[in-house]
Image (cartoon, rainbow, N blue to C red):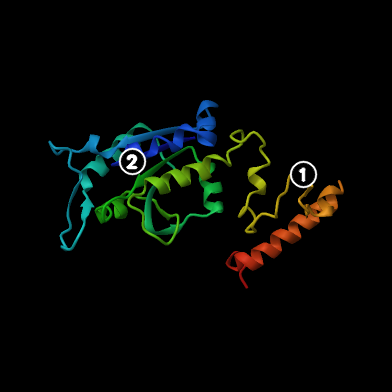
Amino acid sequence: MRIDILTVLPELLTGPFDHSIIKRAKQKGIAEIFVHNIRDYSADKHKKVDDYAFSGGAGMVMTIQPIESAIESLTKARNYDEIIYTSPDGELFKQQIANQLSSYTNIIILCGHYKGIDHRIREHLITRELSIGDYVLTGGELAAAVMTDAILRVIPGVLSDETSALTDSFQDNLLSAPVYTRPSDYKGWKVPEILLSGNTKLIDAWQHEQALERTKRLRPDLIGD
């Protein structure tokens, strides 16, 4: 899988992609991640990528030319399954979306910044707009890193135990059941006896029951009416 990220602050993405799961995916050749500086595509002699909004008001807007040129350069070289824009008013990014995107070959993620981007980019070039939550970040770089991590970790071969991602929270619209490790008794704090029984069928039933109870209590919105 190839992910191309367009940003005005590529330095923000250096650390997240050089460690842990994402680093492993790149080393295995399962994923390629390319971070592109939008300023490199600016026709302005000062590499300017923002300007005042026609409507006035505070804040700057990312201009159309550098973004369009960057996307055009990439799409001329290969076909992309999605061109995603990180935006607080986009569709809420959920596990099911991460699963879907993980099956794609090539995607572009455009990181918003300032007061946003010239709306014509959203109208004519963006195929999907995604948000990681109902709050505003300084830019879309952190959102792009979150999405990239969530997408890559469910691709077969990325995790050492390929079944691990299938039991994560939200995979079946349930939170995960509680997990424990040794020692089984720590200062009187004991692991539930059923987990020590070795009875796989009973353990599976307990875990599902606990997952359902925790979801109803902590995130009832995941279950609905």
Where disc 2 sits, the SS reads: strand
Kindly give the residue lying farthest to the front in the view shown: 187
Between residue 125 and residue 24, name the one nearer to us.
Answer: 24
Looking at the picture, which amino acid does disc 2 mark? Leu
Point out the tag, 1 or 2, that comes first from the N-terminus: 2
Q: Residue furthest bottom?
A: 225
Q: Is residue 158 above or below residue 130?
A: above
In space, the residues marked 1 and 2 are separated at their CA atoms by 47 Å
Determine the residue positioned at 20% across, 44% down.
Answer: 49
Find residue 52 and name its label: none
210 or 3: nearer the viewer: 210
With 209 as the anchor, is 222 left or right in this view? left
Q: Residue at x 42, y 49 (%)?
A: 143
The residue that mark 1 highlights is 183
Residue closest to the eye, 138 or 155: 138
**Which residue corresponds to the image point at 53% horizontal and 48% vertical from the top-left?**
98
Can residue 192 be seen here? yes
Packing grade of label 2 (10 A; few <14, some 14-19, many >=20) is many
Q: Quadrant of the C terminus?
A: bottom right
Q: Can residue 82 be seen by looking at this rendering?
A: no
Q: Position of residue 180 (x, y in %)?
A: 73, 48
Image coords of residue 119 (percent x, y): 26, 56
Q: Which mark is residue 6?
A: 2
Residue 145 sits in quarter: top left
**What is the three-letter code of the residue carrying label 1?**
Pro
Q: Locate residue 67, reporting x and y percent.
A: 26, 43
Secondary structure under the numbered disc 1 in the rendered image: loop
